[in-house]
């Protein structure tokens, strides 16, 4: 091939390389053009991974049957590795005589003459073009010439531009796929479907985009990765043993810390097999970081939605319990008193007996309704809870007061922590005891308000609490309970007569 023909072939090859954005196609055309321009029988291109080694190896001249007999593709050792660390063209008369040569595996065809040229893409070494076994038109072996080196170098330079464009396109497409995955995962997590199904969708989408063999979501830091996940950025590393992640053998792990603002939400890991010498998966960590931010936000929103749903259920249970207590029980109690009064005025014994039996039935009905109220107001279905305990104290005080105080509860009692609930019950008990001992009241109202704070009010229409009583241990203990939790207590007279005790503490610490 004369000079003009080879130049024409080179220009044709350059045009062919720049006509596609698919990296695999660019690499195949590069190897084919390199063999054709230099007369090489065999050609290959090794793509360097971000973490060392070869992540891709495109070859020409060896049939599929021989490839199968040779076994695994090269990982970048020997002369191939030399080019990666010393990115300059190299020509050899005898490949085996190079100081870095490590020989060939069984069934590999013999190779003697060698030409290697680095492929640069946007200032970085993308890979190396390897050409071996140059022959002339008659099939006679020849050494690669300086002209061959010039042609291969020019071809590699053109290929570098095409590879740079193709790589940018691939990264843009990968970024787009991660954005699509983030949208799909956010929709699944916030659509109201069961959490297990939503998390399954998240794992499936990540596995599809990253082409990972396993994807896991962790509440806490995965063992062996604590040091890597102290920051916000995803990390990719090889673990010599994946046992801590429930996997066998060495693995590559992409670990994504999921944080909403500065709050830890979870961690996501994607895994690939990691045999010795494997260059690992090629992942755009900046795209993964954007996905992780969106996923963390979606998980946070999903958790908030679940909290609101649980609170709505609790509020509805509280409303039903309040209605049962304020309307149904009070009416039943009034009916019972009326029937009991009628029984006392009845003349015939059988009528009296029937009326008394009706009163007993009403008492049993009231007990059943109270039990239902307690269960509605209790956390986790327990029959003990703040509403139950306060209601029980109010009912118990009827024995010492001579009448049943009125009780009003507003807010969701299930949101009150157990320790504050215990103090609240103690306040109601002590306040009612003081009214019974000192106030000579005919009516008492107990009010419990639950919002950002817990407020207990016990108001009576009696003669008031003597001055010396307010300094005694009972009320002093209640004041100490409030102070210890950052709250306050007051005992003040009411304008129309009587006393109002108010005790309040915040639900959340300041």
Image: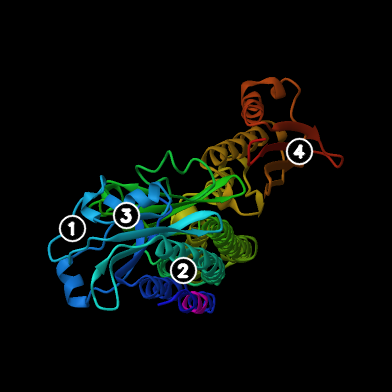
Decide: is 185 above or below 414.
Answer: below
Instruction: Locate residue 92 relative to residue 497 in the image: left or right.
Output: left
Mark 2: few/some/many CA within 10 Å (<14, 14-19, 20+): many
Residue beneath label 4, please?
A: 500
The residue lying furthest to the front in this view is: 2
Tag 2, which secondary structure?
Answer: helix
Q: CA distance from mark 2 to mark 3?
A: 46 Å
Q: Is residue 66 left or right of residue 257?
A: left
Question: Between tags 2 and 3, which lies in front?
Answer: 3
Residue 376, numbered label: none
Q: Position of residue 26 (x, y in %)?
A: 45, 73
Which label's residue is closer to the chain start, 1 or 4? 1
Tell me the CA gap for discs 3 and 1. 12 Å
Which residue position is annotated with label 2? 198
Q: Are marks 1 and 4 in contact (CB under 8 Å)?
A: no
Q: Residues within 10 Å of mark 1 (few under 14, many from 20)?
A: some
Q: Main secondary structure of the magenta part?
A: helix
Q: Identify the secondary structure beneath mark 4.
A: strand
Q: Toward which corner of the image does residue 164 lie, by quadrant?
A: bottom right
Asked if disc 2 and disc 3 are in contact, CB closer than 8 Å, the reply is: no
Q: Which circle, 3 or 4, is nearer the viewer?
A: 3
Q: Nearer the viewer, residue 461 or 158?
A: 158
Q: Which mark is residue 80?
A: 3
Count residues near mark 3 (Cα–Cα under 10 Å), then give few for <14, some for 14-19, many for 20+: many
- Name the quadrant containing residue 402: top right
Residue at mark 1: 104
Does residue 106 appear anywhere in the picture?
A: yes
């Amino acid at each position: 091939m004369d000079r003009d023909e080879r130049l024409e072939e080179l220009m044709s090859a350059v045009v062919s390389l720049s006509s596609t954005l698919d990296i695999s196609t660019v690499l195949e055309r590069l190897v084919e053009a390199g063999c054709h321009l230099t007369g090489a029988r065999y050609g290959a291109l090794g793509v360097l991974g971000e973490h060392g080694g070869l992540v891709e190896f495109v070859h020409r001249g060896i049939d599929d049957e021989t490839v199968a007999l040779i076994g695994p593709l090269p990982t970048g050792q020997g002369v191939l590795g030399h080019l990666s660390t010393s990115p300059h063209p190299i020509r050899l008369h005898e490949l085996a005589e190079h100081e870095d040569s490590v020989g060939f595996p069984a069934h590999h065809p013999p190779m003697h003459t060698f030409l290697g040229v680095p492929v640069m893409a946007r200032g970085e070494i993308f890979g190396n073009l390897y050409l071996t076994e140059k022959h002339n038109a008659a099939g006679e072996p020849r050494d690669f010439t300086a002209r061959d080196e010039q042609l291969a170098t020019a071809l590699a330079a053109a290929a570098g531009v095409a590879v740079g464009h193709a790589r940018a396109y691939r990264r843009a497409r990968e970024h787009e796929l991660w954005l699509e995955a983030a949208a799909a995962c956010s929709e699944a997590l916030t659509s109201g479907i069961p959490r297990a199904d939503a998390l399954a969708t998240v794992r499936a989408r990540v596995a599809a985009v990253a082409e990972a063999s396993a994807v896991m979501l962790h509440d806490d830091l995965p063992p062996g990765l604590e040091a890597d996940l102290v920051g916000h950025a995803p990390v990719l590393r090889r673990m010599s043993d994946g046992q801590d992640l429930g996997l066998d053998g060495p693995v590559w792990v992409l670990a994504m810390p999921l944080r909403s603002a500065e709050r830890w939400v979870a961690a996501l890991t994607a895994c690939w097999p990691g045999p010795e010498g494997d260059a690992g998966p090629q992942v755009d960590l900046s795209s993964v970081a954007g996905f992780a931010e969106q996923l963390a936000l979606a998980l946070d929103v999903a958790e908030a939605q679940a909290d609101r749903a649980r609170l709505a259920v609790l509020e509805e249970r509280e409303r039903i319990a309040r209605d049962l207590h304020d309307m149904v029980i009070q009416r039943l109690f009034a009916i019972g008193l009326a029937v009991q009064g009628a029984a006392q005025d009845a003349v015939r014994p059988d009528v009296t007996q029937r009326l008394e039996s009706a009163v007993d039935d009403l008492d049993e009905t009231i007990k059943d309704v109270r039990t239902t109220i307690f269960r509605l107001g209790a956390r986790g279905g327990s029959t003990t809870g703040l509403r139950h305990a306060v209601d029980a104290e109010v009912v118990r005080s009827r024995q010492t007061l001579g009448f049943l105080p009125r009780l009003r509860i507003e807010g969701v009692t299930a949101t009150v922590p157990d320790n504050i609930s215990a103090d609240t019950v103690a306040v109601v008990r002590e306040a009612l005891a003081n009214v019974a001992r000192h106030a000579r009241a005919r009516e008492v109202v107990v009010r419990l308000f639950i919002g950002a704070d817990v407020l207990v009010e016990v108001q009576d229409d009696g003669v008031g609490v003597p001055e010396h009583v307010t300094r005694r241990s009972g009320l002093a203990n209640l004041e100490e309970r409030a102070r210890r939790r950052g709250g306050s207590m007051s005992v003040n007279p009411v304008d129309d007569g009587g006393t109002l005790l108010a005790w309040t503490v915040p639900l959340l610490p300041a």
